Amino acid sequence: MSSPQPSILNKLIGNAPLRTVLIVPFVLQIIGAVGIVGYLSFRNGQKAVNDLASQLRTEVSSRIDQHLDSQLDTARHLAQVNADAFDVGLLDPKDLDNMTRFFWKQMQLFNIGYISFGAPGGEFAGAGYHLDKNIQMGIVDPKKNGTRDFYNYNADSRGNKTTLIDTYKNYQFKKELWYSNTVKAGKPTWVLYQWEITPFPLAVSANRPIYGRKNQLIGVIGIDQRLSQISDFLRQLKVSKSGRTFIVERSGLMVASSSTEKPFKLIDGKPKRLKASESSDGQIQSAARYLLKHFGGDFNNIKDAQQLDFLLNKERQFVQVLPWKDEWGLDWLVVVVVPESDFMGQINANTRTTILFCIGALIVATVVGFYTSRLIAGPIALLSKASQDFASGKFDRTVEVSGKNELGVLSESFNDMAQQLRDSFTALENTNAELEKRVEERTVELKIAKEMADGANRAKSEFLANMSHELRTPLNGILGYAQILQRSEPLTHKGRGGVDIIYQCGSHLLTLINDVLDLSKIEAGKLELHPAAFHLPSFIQGVAEICAIRAEEKAISFDLQVDPQLPAGVCGDEKRLRQVLLNLLSNAVKFTEKGGVIFQVDVLQDAEFSDGSSQLENSTENSYKIWFRVEDTGPGMTPAQVQKIFLPFEQVGDVKKQSEGTGLGLAIAQKIVRLMQSEIAIGSRPGEGSIFSFEVELPEAQNWADSSRIVEQGAVLGYQGDKRKILVVDDRWENRAVLVNLLQPIGFEMIEAADGKEGLDIALAAAPDLILTDLAMPVMDGFELLRDIRAHPQLREAIVLVSSASVFEIDRQKSLDAGGNDFLPKPVQADLLLGLLKKYLQLEWVYGETADAGEKAQQGTIGKMQLPAIEILQLLNEQAQAGDLDAVIEIAEQIQTANPEHATFAKKILVLAEGFQVKELRALIEEHLS
Ligand code: ADP
């Protein structure tokens, strides 16, 4: 199961220092909390402001509405009252002074601008505010004054004219709208007009026509309400810091506003009304324009109260527009404009404070977080540093314990752990040191033991070499003389048998010595292969022949099956290959009593080399896999026995047969085959027989003929040509005797010397054709002798053969290096000796008995056993049937001596008769009779 992938957050946190991990979330939390609170309070404030602004606008609008109602109602009512006074005759249109005094008194009571009366005859009476803050009285009396000039008087506290303030020439009040419009309308009506005289105040006047009994116009009463008074009211209304209120007519002309601007302009001394949308006050102007735009360019489209808002210089402006109407036909719009910033100022200030608090809190939180994290992370960092040091091998680290909290406990635990680890390491180091010491001691012991073992091995090798030397020397005598006796004059049957047994026993002993030496060499890894070119068919023939003879002696068949494809010359260690094959074949023959042995040699395949050359091209780089197979019909072996037979000195099966062997053959054979990179395989069944086989790869060799050995051609009787002189140098008389007795009978002149010194002297004196010298000798040894011979001008060219019982390869090589022509191992093998003599003295042997073995080898067949005459066979049969074995032996011996060509048959008969194997004897004779 795969572990879950760490999230990005985990990765970030995992890599960030602990301090950051502790501070950042802390700060983030504070920013989050303060931010959300700030945002919510800002939003709530904004909402409250909206509500407040809405309420305020409504409130302000309704107050203006009330004010207008009350102010203009007064004017209306007063117009009505005064008209009524005329109607009922309380006021006389002719008594202008009285009328002005009455108006003056009314002015004291009511908050209005001016009360006027105009008559069609041009008479005018009025009282009210004109130029200053005092109530003045004005009269135009054409009848009395003869002019239409306007006389403006001050009044005393009782309303009587006092002083004339100024006069206005030809006051044409009838042109003024209050009069003309009312006369035109013929009913009470409102008129908004501008005075014809300075300061041209703008006024709204409630007017009423007065008719006489005959419905003739007596005059018009007008009650002025100056618009500046409404503006004053609007100004004194506290909307907000920079809020505005204004009143417009549906035509868009300004009536009054809370700004200081007048609702008209003087152009060339003439007043001109101002449109709200042209006001110099930005707020009024933009509000009027916004409303116009919003209501399709016409204020008449505003039917009822509306609350709206718009942006002015990116600031929100709340607007309330309220239509105001009056019974006499006034139709105005009251507009209240409140900028949001008036309310938001506090809220923005609050927001700024919140942000400042937030920053403050952040700084505090960061500082606190920094110190908190230092408090936490500091000890942890120390711990981590200590752990890292610990991991890198600085075991002396401890952590300072601060306080009793979790970190303190952790530090304490770390110190405890570190101490324990230190103790463990110390213990480990001690153990290591102890172990090292022990190993050293053991090494020393082992060294001593190895030296002892080497010494023992050397001693063993020396012992083996010496023993073998010591054993070979007497054996040389035994075998030498056995061979001499075998080759010399005819002996009695018993005598020859005795010599044969001596030779066989000696050979057996020699084999045993050689085997033991081979094995010890193999085990010491000193056995090496010496490959050389040789003729494979004749080699196989030679091996087969030896075993065929033994098989024949045992009266079992021996079948050689050679692959016709067999190469002629191959390169290999002929001596070792022969040793292996002879071991397998002689075992097969030895253990087989019935049936026979098949020796099969096959070419398995040609191993091609990388250059692609093949066997057909007969290239020297070709090599052959040769398969050797030895099959017998002997006793066979159980699997358990098979497992044991390759072990040294292991013998299985028939005890009688065991005594004939050493139990070393197969062990050595297997080791040699392994040196050849192969393995001996066994197939065996008890009671049926065994098959031993192995394959070796042998490179082809063309120059085999040079080194091929001469096949023995029979017993040597002498040689052609002059008599040759041979000097034998050996300190042991028996060794000298063997050589002398071997060579003298075949025509050599033999001279003897007991040591090197003597040998040198004799060689100089007698000038032998060939010198045979031993190596180990007193006075002067073989090596010294060789060096002296090669150094001596007279002897430099002499042929010297070294013959030694030394088993050391090195001795053999040393002797050749010292100048020896060749080496002859002891015990001396006659065939080998004769071969060397033939080679170095260029001799032609004279043979006593010729059998063309070389030819046989080439043919690949073994000569057939020749039989005596049928009469002799019958005689043998009779004696055998009668059980007279002595008679049988006698006849066989006679056959042997009389007819050497029948010797093989005679020998078989002798073996069976002497072994009391009557059944087999009878069977053999019968077989050849039929
Ligand atoms: P030995 O000198 O006794 O022949 P080897 O090592 O050659 O020693 O053989 C070991 C043993 O293996 C023999 O003693 C014999 O018991 C058994 N052995 C070898 N070859 C054969 C065979 N062909 N048939 C039966 N037994 C065999």
Image: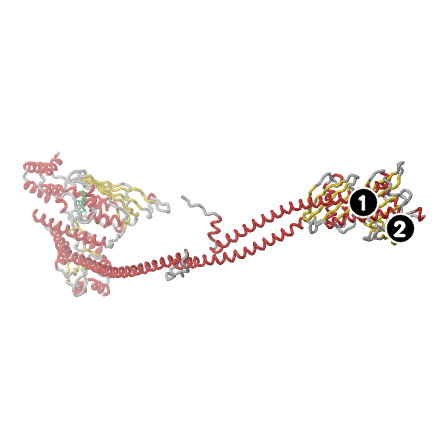
Placement of 777 over or under 179, stated as above or below:
below
What is the number of the mark on residue 2?
Answer: none
Residue under label 2: 151
* Disc nearest the viewer among 2 and 1: 2
Q: How is the image coloured?
A: secondary structure
Q: 557 or 642, which is in the foreground?
A: 642
Whole-percent x and y of residue 482? 12, 52
Whole-percent x and y of residue 359? 56, 55
**Side (left or right) of 221 relative to 343:** right
Residue under label 1: 204
Q: Is residue 448 shown to the viewer in this render? A: yes
Where on the image, by quarter, is ligand 1? top left
Whole-percent x and y of residue 616? 33, 43
**Side (left or right) of 156 relative to 799:** right
Whole-percent x and y of residue 495? 8, 49
Kindly indicate whether the residue at mark 1 contacts the one at mark 2 (C-beta within 8 angstroms). Answer: no
* Disc 2 secondary structure class: strand
Q: State the CA–CA distance, disc 2 to disc 1.
A: 23 Å
Q: 525 or 704, which is in the foreground?
A: 525
**The quadrant where residue 596 appears:** top left
The quadrant in which the N terminus is found is top left
Placement of 213 over or under 536, stated as above or below:
above
* Disc 1 secondary structure class: strand
Amino acid tagged 1 = Val
Mark with earlier residue (2, 1): 2
**The quadrant where residue 686 appears:** top left
Amino acid tagged 2 = Tyr
Placement of 789 over or under 139, stated as above or below:
below
Q: 864 or 390, which is in the foreground?
A: 390
Ligand 1 within 8 Å of the CB at mark 2: no
